[in-house]
Image (cartoon, rainbow, N blue to C red):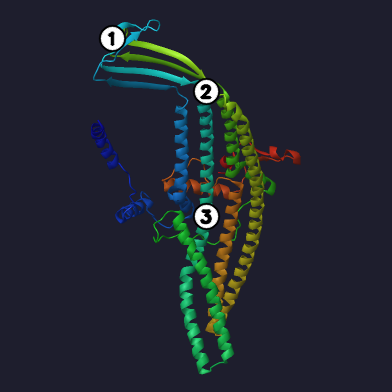
Amino acid sequence: MGIIKLAIFMPFLLVLAGCTVIPAPLTSEDLQSQITDDKARLTADQEPIAGPITLPEAIARALSYNLDLRLALLEKDLAERQLDLARYDQLPEFVTNLAYTGRDKFSGATSQSLITGAQSLEASTSAERDIFTADLGLTWNILDFGVSYIRAKQGADRVLIAEEQKRRVINRIIQEVRTAYWRAVSNDRLIEPQAALLERVTKAIEESRKIEEKRLETPLTALTYQRELIGIKRELQELQRELSLAKIQLAALMNLPPGQEYELAIPERTRELPEFEFTPRMMEQLALEQRSELREVAYQKRINAQETRAAILGLLPGLNLNFSENYSSNSFLFHNDWLSYGAQISWNLLNVFKLPATRRTVEAQDRVLDARRLALSMAVMTQVHVSLAQIEHAKSEFMIADEFNEAQARIMEQVYRAARTNAVSEQVVIREEMNSLVSEVKYDVAYADLENAYANAYQAMGIDQVPAGLSQGDVGSLTRLIQQNFDRLKSGYAGISYQENTNPENMEENELIGMDVVDVLF
């Protein structure tokens, strides 16, 4: 008998042995294939660059192709799909079953009297050896429906959280593009004049060394001149090194292939400062209303409140309703098809002891969210005032750079006039040309810092700098819309009707009347 059992179970053991799973690390071929596929997909389906890139086009390309933004959009799409899935959990279960049972002998039985012990019936059966059964049933648990409804509402709030996270990514990308673009513009303005001037400086330094060797002037004079030229040259190269990274960063933000050459549209230098008429109090109010971080905490509090309701529902008895259509091929049955229905109430009494712990957990989570909201509110208002201070510092530095650049330009005019009459040497001309180039670069850097300060202020307020709902992929349409928004932004924020309460106790009631901030600004 033992041999028979072993013979029966041996094939089963062999099948289990053959299904054993062992770790299979990626091979070099697998990794190379994945790398090749990733490289092909990184920049696939992107519109080619048709000409010099303006700031609106740079932002449009970043919004269309930036991988961080694409990830945020996919995460929002995932949250929406999970919400759709949660809605189905509210529906009753509608289940069908098909079954077959068979045996080599009939299922038979006899009966025995419990009083006399005598057999009361001869062996009989009420079932065939092979039976097919089928049923189609509807089951609905009322308690599960209530819990599923709450989970669906929580899923809806998670969709809104994903939307706020997408907004934050968009605003961060726009800020980084604006900063990188203006610094890259400064770099492009610098390249050609720097290369030509550095060549002249190198020759001037060599000539000065020859003059020093020939003792045509005092060594101290020659060395001082060389030191001055080398110092200005070093300062210029340090500025160029800092600015040259901006173009690489801008290419990464636009998701251009690494190493791809592209040209920027170089705008004319301007001495006009961008419009910015927001008051500190208005900026605080806008930030507390618009910042995505604060909205996320508000949605988290709603999710946490729904968790309490779910816990209370879990305490209630579960009412299970069922209805089904049944069929059996057993010919011994009087009816081979029938309807069945019923109701069942079940209650886990131990859940009563779980409720206080659940309540304490939810209340603790709510306190954490309140503390987080207060901390974020303080951080947001601090960022608003820091951004205002950055604007004031950037304005001051820009005006100083502008004045210095104007003074250097007038000096350069005098030097050129003197050079035409041989009143100054070539060394003086070269030195002042280097000073002029450094002055122009510092002017461009100061303007780039000013643009960055304004970008920081808009991000600190949480204002969307592009219209909501812009689709990805159409760079031309995005560029035109963004340019229109920039044109409207330059004219200030006229059109916002802002009501500011005079009572400090009612500061939270300050509001923008009539229109959404984003809709009005853009």
Q: Is residue 180 visible?
A: yes
Callouts 3 and 2 close, C-beta under 8 Å:
no
Q: Residue furthest bottom?
A: 215
Dot 1 corresponds to which residue? 124
Q: Counting other residues with Cα less than 10 Å from the Cα at mark 2, is it few (<14), some (14-19), or many (20 or more)? A: some
Real-space CA distance between mark 3 and mark 1, rounded to the nearest whole angstrom: 86 Å
Look at the picture and state if 439 lies above or below 4.
below
Dot 3 corresponds to which residue? 176
Front disc: 3 or 2: 2
Q: Which mark is residue 217?
A: none
Front disc: 2 or 1: 1
Q: Counting other residues with Cα less than 10 Å from the Cα at mark 3, is it few (<14), some (14-19), or many (20 or more)? A: many
The answer to which image quadrant residue 472 occupies is top left
> SS for tag 3?
helix
> SS for tag 2?
helix
Q: Judge left or right: residue 410 versus residue 7.
A: right
Callouts 2 and 1 close, C-beta under 8 Å:
no
Look at the picture and state if 512 lies above or below 250.
above
Of the residues shown, which amino acid type is indicated by label 2?
A: Leu
- Work out whether mark 2 precedes mark 1 in sequence or the reverse, and give the earlier one: 1
x, y (%) of residue 214?
50, 94
- Work out whether mark 3 precedes mark 1 in sequence or the reverse, and give the earlier one: 1
